[in-house]
Amino acid sequence: MLINLYSPFAQKFIFTNGDFNYPDRNQNYIFAQVPYHRARKNLIKLILGKIPEWRGKYSSKWLDKNLTENFDIIISFIYSPCALLFGTWISQKKKCKHIIHIADHCDFFLQPKYLEAIKTADSLLVISNRMKALYEKHSQRKDIKVFHNIPDDRCFPDQALDSIDDSRMFSKSAPFRLIFIGGLYEYLHKSSIEDIISSVAALHDQGIPIEMDIYGARYPESFLDKEIKLKGITHYGVVMPLDSKYEIMENADAFVIPSSFDPTLNNDYQYSFPSKLTELLSTAKPVIYYGSSDTSIHEFLNQIGSSVTVTKRSVNLLNEALINLIDNYPARKLDAEKISRMIRKDYDMKTTRRAFGSHLTHINS
């Protein structure tokens, strides 16, 4: 979710994924499992208002009990058809404007039932220019705007960039530390992340001072079971508390962004990119992209001038890129500092929030 973008404006957050249903969550976050289990026994729960949805039907009792306030606008930040229709229904019941913000594209969205909701929404937002072009074609809308995640000010270096020491030397006792941070999803990262892990482990075995730290849950839990046991690889699991990610970022030497080379998996994900992308680029640390060239990630990195991209699936090319990065770290660090300046200039939190607020005002007028 684009917390940095939404948080100044939202009164309530409804989330539909049980993976994020933590017991100590903020009271402004309401859990609504959509879709709910389809078993016939759950119909009575729907009638009593104990669950929000069952087999495509929604509970007004659940809504009245859990969302008592009146709202001017409902924003549906969506990655599934179920969330799209649920948000549309809430906006209709609350008699308010509806903004659809597409996080991840899926071909279901282009089916008539879902495309009609997209066409009739009061506003359509997307997170990449590639996604914008796709939905302009299929929805015939000419008012689509691009808003993606913006980096928190804490992502940027504490020191002035001109004063950062780029002359670090790596050794076995102080190895080059490559970081992946975020959820690892088989349907997004398979046929990419395995190569990265294998490359780091092989270089580590050869005596090259490199290690990889992986932060985030794996979906499914069995994904990468063998790979994370290799020497030089450490999987730390979910980052908690969430604010500890800033310390992780500060201690990293570089970050890696994997994107699947599998054309079937890439079919949908080519239109999206990780919510942490601008956060990583703001750190003034090199970012390595390993994935296909026909993605929104690669387009964005080309736009801002990423220092390291490997767009052909090859462990040998990946090895060369990592060795080159270690051997020429001062130069690649200077490239990363230029990118950090660009991110601060073009994706400043205050400026982007102002633009988003103006859009909300326009839609509500």
Image (spheres, rainbow, N blue to C red):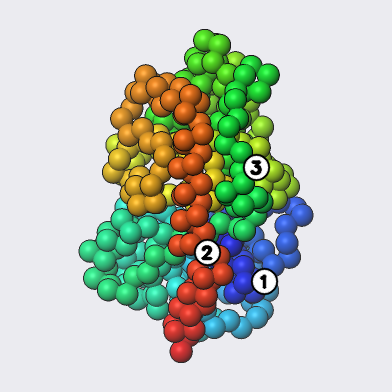
Q: Answer whether residue 272 is visible to the viewer in this image.
A: yes
Q: Residue furthest bottom?
A: 365
In which image quadrant can residue 219 be found? top right
User: Label 3, on which residue?
Assistant: 250
> Mark 2 and mark 1: span between their CA atoms?
35 Å
Q: Nearer the viewer, mark 2 or mark 1?
A: 2
Q: Nearer the viewer, mark 1 or mark 3?
A: 3
Establish if 134 lies above or below 260.
below
Say which residue appears at 54% left-offset and 15% top-offset. 208
Kindly identify which numbered label has been placed on residue 66: 1
Q: Amino acid at mark 3?
A: Glu
Mark with earlier residue (2, 1):
1
Residues under numbered marks 1 and 3 in contact, where contact means CB atoms less than 8 Å apart: no
User: How packed is label 2: few (under 14 Cα within 10 Å), some, or many (20 or more)?
Assistant: some
Say which residue appears at 70% left-offset and 50% top-offset. 243
> Mark 2 and mark 3: span between their CA atoms?
19 Å
Secondary structure beneath dot 2 equals loop
Residue 99: x and y in percent read 45, 73
Q: Amino acid at mark 2?
A: Asp
User: How packed is label 1: few (under 14 Cα within 10 Å), some, or many (20 or more)?
Assistant: some
Judged left or right of residue 138, residue 322 is right
Mark with earlier residue (2, 3):
3
User: Label 2, on which residue?
Assistant: 348
User: How packed is label 3: few (under 14 Cα within 10 Å), some, or many (20 or more)?
Assistant: some
Q: Amino acid at mark 1?
A: Asn
Mark with earlier residue (1, 3):
1
Establish if 296 lies above or below 322.
below
